[in-house]
Structure formats: C-alpha cells, structure tokens
Amino acid sequence: MSMMSRRGVLGATAGLAAAGALGHPLARPALAQPRFPNRPLQMIVPWGAGGGTDATARIIAALLEKELGQPVNVVNRTGGSGVVGHSAIAMANPDGYTIGIITVEIAMMHWQGLTELTHANYTPLGLMNRDAPGVQVSASSPYKDIKALAEGIKNSPPGKLKASGTGQGGIWHLALVGWLQAMGLKPDHVRWVPSNGAAPGMQDLVAGGIDIVPCSIPEARAMLDAGRARSLAIMAPERDPQFPDIPTLKESLGVDFQTAVWRGIGGPLKMPAEQVAILTAALERVYKSKEYSDFMKSRGFGMDWADGPGFGKVMAETDAAMGVAMKAAGLTKA
Amino acid sequence: MTDLFEGLRLVLQTDVLIAIAASAVYGLVIGSLPGLSATMATALLVPVTFYLSPIAAVATIITASAMAIFSGDIPGCLLRIPGTPASAAYTDEAYAMTRKGQAELALGTGLWFSAIGGIAGTLSLLIMAPALAEVALNFSSFEYFWLAVLGLMCATLVARSSPVKAIASMLLGLLFSCIGMENPAGTPRFTFGMTDLLGGIEPLPALVGVFAVSQVMRALSEAEPPPLPRRRFGSIMAGQWALTKKYPKPMMRGNIVGIIIGVLPGAGADMAAWVSYALSKRFSKEPQKFGTGHPEGLVESGASNNASLASGWVPALLFGIPGDTITAIAIGVLYMKGLNPGPTLFTERASSMYALYIIFILANIIMIPLGIIMIRVAATVLRAPRASIMPIILLLCAVGAFATGNNLFAVLLVAFFGTLGYVMERNGYPVAALVLGIVMGSMVEQSFVTSLIKSDNSIMPFFDRPISAVLAAITLGALLWPVAAWLIRRMKARAPAVAGASGGHANG
C-alpha cells in the first residue's frame, strides 16, 4: 500500500512536471508487427488538477490503460479559461497517441470571439458524461413547484428576480436564457448575478442574496441533502435516475427546453481510421465497466455514451443552441 | 461515545496510518519548495486517493495540506522566499530573525504555533461546526466586500515602508487582478489578444516572481551578506513555551481570527495570515519592533493560517461549499469516497466524522517531530554558499510555475514579476502589498459588482444589513482613525503653543 501511494505520488508529480511533448522513456522497441498502441498515450485536460473534469479524465485514463495495455498519462494544460488546453488537443500530432477531454465550453468560446476553434476542429472519439441543469430555489422560497416559479417570474417586473451559479455568459447563464426564451420571455427578464461557480451561487441562494440557481443537480446536491434548497425541475428530456423525484420541465411545465454540460474524449483532425476505431471501442468498454459507473455514481455525475459520430452530433447541436442563446443574451462578439 | 471509539478504530488501521505518515513527509517537502503551494500538493494527491480506502484518502489530504502550510514558513525564514502564499505576510519578519541569528526560534515559532492553531481549528470544527456554518451562510456579497476591503488595508499596516508606497504597490496589484476574463462581465480585459492572458494573473507565479526570482537577482547584483557565524543549530522547541506564556493574547487572537476567516467560503489561509499579522502589529505594545525580527507577529499569524485550514472544512463538510481551494479539492474526494457532505455526515456517519477529527489532531501532533527533522535538514542551506543555492532556486521556480498548468506562459510570468519585484524593492516599494492586491483584487471587484446587481444599484444594503453594518463601521473606523489621531495630536501640540513645532508626522 505504501509503495503504491508513493509510486502514485511520484508518478503524478513526474507526469505534471514532464514537458507536454516528452514521452515515456520506457517506450518498448517496435516489434515485428507494430500494433496501435505500442507506446504510452497522453490525455490532455484543459482544466486544473483537482476539479471535476480532471477527476473524470483521470478515471478514464486509468481504465483506458487497462484496456489498451499502455500507460495513459494525464497532462493538465490550463490557462486562457480552457482555450489553451483545447487548442493543444486540436493541434496535437494526429497519430492517435495524443487525445484529450473536450468540455462543453468548446461550443461557447468561439461565439464570444475568444478563439477560432470549434467542435469541427476535432475527431470525436466518445461522449462519456452529460449533466442537465436543475432549477434550484432556497428552502425558504415562496415557490413550491416549477409552475409557481414560472408564474412568479412572468408576473414579476423584468430584472426583479435574480439568478446565479456561474460567470456572465457561462453555461448555467445560458440555460436560464434558453428557458426564459422558451417561456416567451426576454433573456434578461431574470437578472444574472455572475459568480465564481455553482458552490458560491448555492451559498448566496441560501443566504437570501438571489432567487434561482440553475446549476447541475450534483453541484447542488449537498444543499439539497441539507434541506436548505429545493430542486423544482430538471432541464432534461427525462428524469435523472439518481434523482427520480425531480420532474422534467416538459412534464411539469409543458415547456420543452433542455440543455446540458458534457464531457467527451476527442483528438485532432485527420487521425487514422484504425486508431479511431481502436480508441472508440476501448472507450466504450471503459464506459461500460463497473469501475467507471461506480465512480460516476459516487460523484453524482450523469452517465451518457455516444460513439465518435454520435459525440460529433451532440457537439454540433450544442454549438447551434449555444449560438442562439448567446446571441439573444447579447454575449456574442459582433 | 461508541462513535468516538469506532472513529478511533477507523483511524488505527495500518493503511490509514501509513497514508498519514507518507503524506506528511510529502506535504512537508512540497510546501518547503518555493513555487509549489499547499493547493498543488493537494491536487497532486487526488489520483492517489483513487486507490485508497475512504478514511485513508481523506487523511492524505488533511495531513498533506496542514504540513505544506507549515513548511511554507521554512524557505521564507531561511532565504526570504515564502514557500506558499500563506507565509508571505510574515516572511520579512522571519528572515530578519534569521539574520539576527535566531533562525531556530523563528522556525520553532512557526512549527509550535502552527500545531496549536491547527488543533484550535479542529476543536472549533468539533464543537461549533453547525453554529459556525450558520454564520458563514449569512455572509452574502455585501459582507464579503467589506471583508475584502479590510484585507486590502492590511497592506499599509504590515508594510514597514512609507504607507504611500505600500498603497501604490497594492494598487498595482489590483491593476494586475483586472487582467483576463474572470471578471463579473465575463469580458476579456487587458489581454491584448493574447490567449494566455484570458485566465488572468494567478497569485502563485506573481508570488514566486516577486519573492524568489527577485531575491536571486539581488544575489547577483549585491555583495554576499556577512556570513552568519558558524555554530551548531540550537534547540528548535526551546523558548516556545516562554513565547506561549509571553504572548497568550496574540496566540488566542490568531486562533480565533483564523477560525473565523477559515469558515468564510472564499477567504482562506492566505488572508488569515495577513489579517492576523496586521492585527498583531496594531494591538502590540511594541509595534516599533515589528519587521526587525520580533516573534510576536509570527506567533499570531502562524497560529492563524493553520487554524483557518481546519475551520475551512466546516462549510465543506456541512454544505459542500469550499472554504478555500484545498477544501474545494477535498469535496470532490469526499463525494468519490461516499462521504457525501451534508448534515447527515454528522449524524448518520458520526464515526467517520470522529475519524476525521482524530486525523486532524494526529496530523498536528506528528507535525512537531517531523517538522523538527525537516527544519534541521533545511537549515543546511544556511551553511551552503549562496552561489550554489541561487541557481537551484531559480530552477525550482521555473519548474514549479510550469508544473501548475504545463504552460510555458506561467514561467514567463514568473520572470516578469521577478524583474518587477527587483525594481520595486530597489525603490522601497513593498512587494508583499503587490501580492496582496493580486490575491484580493478579484474578491473586491466581484463582491462589489454582484452586490450592486443584486440591489439594483442601491448602495444601502452595504450599510443596512446587520453584519455588513458592523464590518463597514470597522473598515471606515480603521480608515479614518489615523487621520483623527493625527488631528488630535496636532491640536494637542498647538495647545501649549510651542512656537515652530513641526507638524509633519510620519504615520506608521
């Protein structure tokens, strides 16, 4: 046990300290019939070590290593609010040995004029996770169900009610905008209060500073469990099996609006078809493994699988929907 | 009671004890390397926790973070290079003690009062967690705004240079914190089209630059300081009991301030150390000794930053709200290991909670012997020639900056801040105030702008919410007090009508 944790520590340190381009020194000599993969892979994470995306990438990498028989080194490439890491994935050598975890921000950043990169710059390999936002209110809120809240929003003067849960133009802001538009309201009818993520937003909800937090249910879970907040609805096509008591917007309000954050694995364009097939098949086995579902369940993350083309479709759909919502909210760069 | 014994049994497993010992050594080493922070020590542990039992996983994080915060004091004291941002507030003081030949006293103070602070913080967690969490939940952006302003005011209190220069440094730090798109509007500012600037200026590269790199540059350009007399490194713990008896009030104040700041989400060990050092100077009977190698401020702020570390777990455990970046990572691990934060953790899984308390206390106790060994090993750098130490430090700075995000831009930032820090120090501008500005800048802006959005642009809630009103009174009082004191002194001086009395006061 001690050896294991020591090795883990050293391995992680070395992995982080080693330059992105450096491979593993122990690459096996090529045998007569080189099969992919015959040397270690690298998985780029555009977000910092210790966060939710990092943890997901690390569990996928650990399980992928078992499937492929080669080490999969996780490398955090942070900076530029995700732009730096996403660029690194798109610009990697398309030999199949550098892949990365792509997050929903890729469908948003280019609309804001932060980068030229879009989902079309990647070879999608597999969708691994999807989380839909809930509509959370404080336990002391007068709105007991989503119908009452929707009525309350419609009858309130524009800008009176406040919502929070991420920065200006962040994914949960756009979820709120999309929902308000689906109800025929203006995108700023409920005013957005920018925050540094869902946890400070949930705290301010309970402190009475704001009225609504449309963050994902796992992010709100602790406050829901503590009885300090209520989740009135989920913006998903169907109920979340982990939270079966929360109705969908469609069934409870008759408003067919849905959105989600997702995480998937992808690589640069022009990857050889054989490599893509091997990686997608391995990712599907990872997705179906007990270890993966146990991990996702424990973190409260939603499970959703799609193969390469399927993941590509999800990215394209999100991209179009985000474009509409961001234009409506005045967040796009002219 | 059975829960307590069950908790003890959970801790006294071989794997848990080994995890504590291994992560203690790991935390001590990471924390003592300039540029590698306690947060990074914790983040690097996450992949390891995948393979550990739940209690062992949480134990590694608790132990490593406590050790790293203490051991950040070591390079600060020996080389004037703080190992973690939480040590930056009192680095100058500790280094001044080393130059006076009291390195062991300074390091021992850091160690002893860190351990006491850590245990005090744990007791607060044990006894008052639900009550403290209620306090934290009543803090909205209005209260945070005043808190952030109070934090900024510490810049002038802590600095030994002229207050005008300290304020100028702090304002420059605030300007740096405006860079990037992590602002309330979500709009890129001062990025000049550079992708790398979108994420803003992190405090860590700035800290490493202005303290470590500028120190290396100074070593290049200045003659070597007179070598410290060669002598056996004295006892580390001797004198600590005397200090405890001499400064019981600063110690208690440090513990309490650390606990309160730790409980408030978003304000962590860094801020606790600053506020405590400033308070210590403000209320000391001998404020003129501060900055010349006086242990009083070390007692208070050393206790404070470790106390805040433990109490930062209160909102994390009860509501899943991170108190600082370390608990943000810990929350993820708690979920992964089935120890979901929430009040039920305290009732249905009370034995696990007791296990956590025991680990906290255990970590703070073994900190003392392991810390002594670490100090003894580290003290050899005092005897090493400067020409062989400085290149290693420069290398560590580059590696540490790169390691946080595998991004070469961070290394360039370190170099930039190193040059800036060198020029500033040369001209008497305190670099610590610059770091404070960068650390607090986004909190000031975020809390002010979001408060105005929430109140529909009315400034009244800054004054009519009860906690906010109290904080406003303290802030404005502290701001206006020097002016009032100066006026009173001036009037008194006038009264005896001493002709030609000079009115100029250097206000410290």
Image (cartoon, coloured by chain):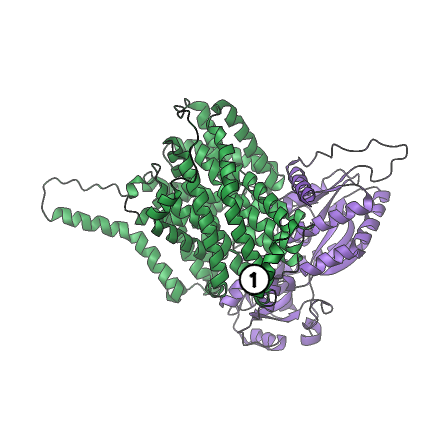
Chain colours: A purple, B green
Q: Amino acid at mark 1?
A: Leu
Q: Is residue B484 left or right of residue B497?
A: right
Which quadrant would residue A324 be assigned to in this image?
bottom right
The C terminus of chain B, quarter of image: top left
Q: Secondary structure at mark 1?
A: helix
Q: Is residue B377 above or below residue A195?
A: above
Q: Residue at x 22, y 48 (%)?
A: B486
Q: Is residue A51 above or below residue B348?
A: above
Q: Is residue A183 above or below residue B373?
A: below
Q: Residue at x 56, y 40 (%)?
A: B30
Q: Residue B307: percent from the left, percent from the top?
A: 46, 52
Q: Is residue A309 left or right of residue B163?
A: right
Q: Residue B363: percent from the left, percent from the top?
A: 54, 49
Q: Is residue B487 left or right of residue A109?
A: left
Give the residue number, with chain letter if any, for mark 1.
B4
Q: Is residue A145 left or right of residue B279?
A: right
Q: Residue at x 44, y 50 (%)?
A: B116
Task: Check disc 1: other Cα within 10 Å, few if <14, some if 14-19, many if 20+.
Answer: some
Query: Given the image, what chain letter belongs to the residue carrying mark 1?
Result: B
The N terminus of chain B, quarter of image: bottom right
